[in-house]
Amino acid sequence: MSTAKVALVCDRSPSVQAHARIPSLLSALRERDGLTLDAYWISTAEADDLEGFDGIWILPGSPYRSEAGAVNAARVAREHGIPFLGTCGGFQHTLLEYARNVLGLAVAHAENDPDAQDFLLMPLACSLVGHEEAVRLTPGSLAEKIIGVEKTVERYSCSFGLNPAYLPVLEEGGLNFTGHDADGAVRILELPGHPFFLATLFQPELAGDGTRPHPIITAFASAATGQQVRR
């Protein structure tokens, strides 16, 4: 059985429910799906040497100690074709990385830099902390193929999302947004042409009781294992 080396990029804390769920999710992946991950917790302040991992997962828990570290994790995965998952804060910093490094935009995250002039990530009109919300998936997208339905209900713990003024720019620049709420706000992004690159504003770590991994987590683990085999 192959073991994939995966970087869990965040600032680990027992107070973050998503972090507390990870050990049981790793056990469930191994026991239920035969997917064994050798997981390394990497602080955002130390996320500068990730090329040797088979998978990179930016976990929730923002504001991170190092915005630059979180952004770098997404960049490394994108540029080196490493299977990637970003959830909640990971979704937000994936957007930040792409906007800055691919599209050359001088944009900020309002949570990290509230005095900036141009925000890519802004406070949501209604906070989603502790909420569940329906997400519509684009037919034929990676997310829809993984989850297997065109509408799903997911759990959130966030207060920031994409500034909708930048949606057309990001779409024209190559990102696919394949999950939306009832009002059309983006909830999932994908990067075409990458082996596995998916980020969600919701937290799949919080699905169920932690004994059955969300399909997105299973798909990421499978992609990381495949990467290890190819290496």
Image: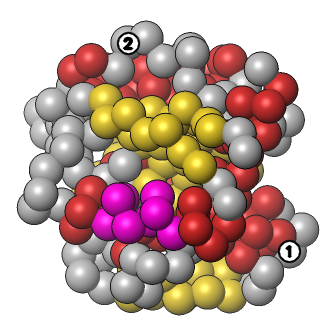
**Looking at the image, is 179 positioned above or below residue 122?**
below
In the image: residue 204, left or right of residue 135: left
Q: Where is residue 93 in the image (x, y as percent from the top left)?
A: 40, 38
Q: Where is residue 81 in the image (x, y as percent from the top left)?
A: 72, 25
- Secondary structure under tag 1 reads loop
Marks 2 & 1, CB-CB < 8 Å contact: no
- Residue at x 52%, y 79% (from the top left corner): 212
Q: Where is mark 1, residue-wise?
A: 139
Q: Which of 226 and 30 is in front in this view?
A: 30
Q: Where is mark 2, residue-wise?
A: 48
Q: Which of 198 and 178 is in front in this view?
A: 198
Q: Residue 34 carries which label?
A: none
**Looking at the image, is 198 positioned above or below residue 125?**
above
Which image quadrant is residue 118 in? top left
Q: Which of 213 and 175 is in front in this view?
A: 213
Q: Position of residue 95 (x, y in %)?
A: 50, 40
Q: Position of residue 162 (x, y in %)?
A: 44, 53
- Residue at x 23%, y 51% (from the top left corner): 61
Give neighbour class at mark 2: few <14, some 14-19, many 20+ (Cα, 10 Å): some
- Residue at x 29%, y 76% (from the top left corner): 128
Give neighbour class at mark 1: few <14, some 14-19, many 20+ (Cα, 10 Å): some
Q: What stretch is highlighted in magenta?
A: 21-28
Q: Nearer the viewer, residue 99 or 153?
A: 153
Q: Quadrant of the N terminus?
A: top right
Residue extending farthest to the right is: 140
Front disc: 2 or 1: 2
25 in magenta: yes
140 in magenta: no
Residue extending farthest to the front is: 1
- Residue at x 27%, y 18% (from the top left corner): 46
Magenta: main secondary structure equals helix
